[in-house]
Amino acid sequence: MLIERGADVIAQNEDGETPLHLASQEGEVEAVRMLLKHGADINTQNKYGLTPFDLALQGGLEEVTCVLLQHGADPGDPLPSGTVLQTPPPHPIAM
């Protein structure tokens, strides 16, 4: 396993996502558990202000969401302002 050989569990990609973000949004429960066991930051935000918990919640991934909560995830505001899901359209379309 890469983690056992020193892989960085808090490394971020160009979108600020860590391996925990990616595992959480893909529903990879065992990977989430392993990353948390090896020190992944459960409440880190990506460049859009989303945490691994937010991504699991948005994806409807109940088991991952529960695991993250059990390990201390801050449920906070699951949709930070300015995200696509909270930003209203500029103007209604005229008919």
Image: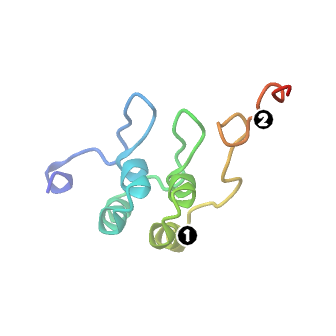
Give the mark, 2 or 1, whose residue is nearer the N terminus.
1
- Label for residue 88? 2
Residue with the mark numbered 1 = 69
Residue sitting at x 46%, y 73% = 63
Q: Residues within 10 Å of mark 1 (few under 14, many from 20)?
A: some
Q: Report the quarter where the C terminus lies.
A: top right
Q: Image height check: is 1 above or below 22? A: below
Q: Inspect the image, locate mark 1, and give the three-letter code of the amino acid beneath it.
A: Leu
Residue sitting at x 45%, y 31% = 15
- Rendered image coloring scheme: rainbow
Instruction: Classify mark 1: helix, strand or loop.
Output: helix
> Closer to the camera: disc 2 or disc 1?
2
The quarter of the displayed image where residue 37 is located: bottom left
Instruction: Classify mark 2: helix, strand or loop.
Output: loop
Q: Image height check: is 87 above or below 33? A: above
- Label for residue 42? none
Residue sitting at x 35%, y 48% = 19
Q: Residues within 10 Å of mark 2 (few under 14, many from 20)?
A: few
The extreme front residue here reads: 95
Q: Image height check: is 94 above or below 74? A: above
Q: Image height check: is 7 above or below 63? A: above
Instruction: Report the front residue among 72 and 52.
Output: 52
Instruction: Report the front residue among 15 and 7.
Output: 15
